[in-house]
Amino acid sequence: MAKPFDESERAAVYRAIHERRDMRHFVAGAVDPRVLERLLDAAHHAPSVGFMQPWRVVRITDPALRTALRDVVERERQATADALGERRDAFMKLKVEGMGECGELLVMALMDGREAHVFGRRTMPEMDLASVACAIQNMWLAARAEGLGMGWVSMFDVDAVRELLRMPEGAKPVAILCLGHVDEFYQQPMLQAEGWAQRAPLADCLYENGWGS
């Protein structure tokens, strides 16, 4: 039987999981290149269906490109607000990105040519997206262990980002990731603290031997 991690190692894993936060508030300071390399390596060691490794990471170092990406996000933020109806004003008070302050800006994308990968995707082609999500989560947990904040920005026009990054046909941006130093981590998820939503009880999400059972 495989040997588990010792108690302190297990505690560290669960601590990273429970204290990970989607961060929006960053402080100035560059990310140590050695730490960034470790985080990218953590992402690259994520599980992927059929071992296809569909993630591609674009590091944004051009200030003008960072500004252009932020403009794309701002346009979608306004459109999202308009679509929320009576919750528009509450939404507009939320800080939904830290692209102007974070030390590193990364775009996580799906590779092109994914149609060639059939293993594990014949009936569920979206498993490539699930694999990219695993890579993002790996990086997120590693960042928390390193004392760095990370935020996932998903409010953007896919084609606009694809064009800005000159992505080939078939490639698709999935997330804009803000990475950097923070004064402190939120004590609870920001949207929960702001009263936007609450974490559902585990019992509401767990069934046995059939849906709803």
Image: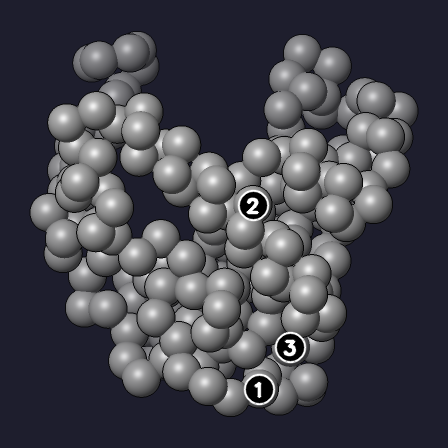
Q: Position of residue 202 (x, y in %)?
A: 19, 37
The disc labelled 1 sits on which kind of residue?
A: Ala
Q: Where is residue 170 in the image (x, y as percent from the top left)?
A: 81, 29
User: What mark, if any, has residue 36 been given in the picture?
Assistant: 3
Q: Position of residue 72 (x, y in %)?
A: 56, 45
Viewer-nearest of discs 1 and 3:
1
User: Of label 1 and label 2, which has the lower sequence position?
Assistant: 1
Q: Name the residue under label 2.
A: 72
Give the residue type that dot 2 points to.
Val
Tell me if I can see residue 11 in this picture: yes
Asked if residue 61 is positioned above or below residue 93 in the image, the reply reads below
- Left or right of residue 61, residue 132 in this image: left
Disc 1 to disc 2: CB gap under 8 Å: no
Image quadrant holding the C terminus, namely: top left
| Mark 2, secondary structure of its residue | helix
Q: CA separation, marks 2 and 3?
A: 25 Å
Q: Where does the image place residue 45, in percent across and percent down from the top left? A: 68, 58
The kind of residue on which mark 3 rests is Leu
The reply to whether the C-beta atoms of the residues labelled 2 and 3 are less than 8 Å apart is: no
Q: Is residue 5 visible?
A: no
Q: Is 173 located above or below residue 21 in the figure?
A: above
Task: Please give the name of the residue rendered at 71% of the width and 24% of the height, measured from the top-left corner.
Answer: 120
Q: In this view, does 99 lie above or below 8?
A: above
Q: Mark 1 falls on what kind of element?
A: loop
Question: Residue under circle 1?
Answer: 30
Q: Which of 145 and 190 is in front in this view?
A: 190
First along the sequence among labels 1 and 3: 1
Q: Nearer the viewer, residue 75 or 187?
A: 75
Front-lying residue, 162 or 2: 162
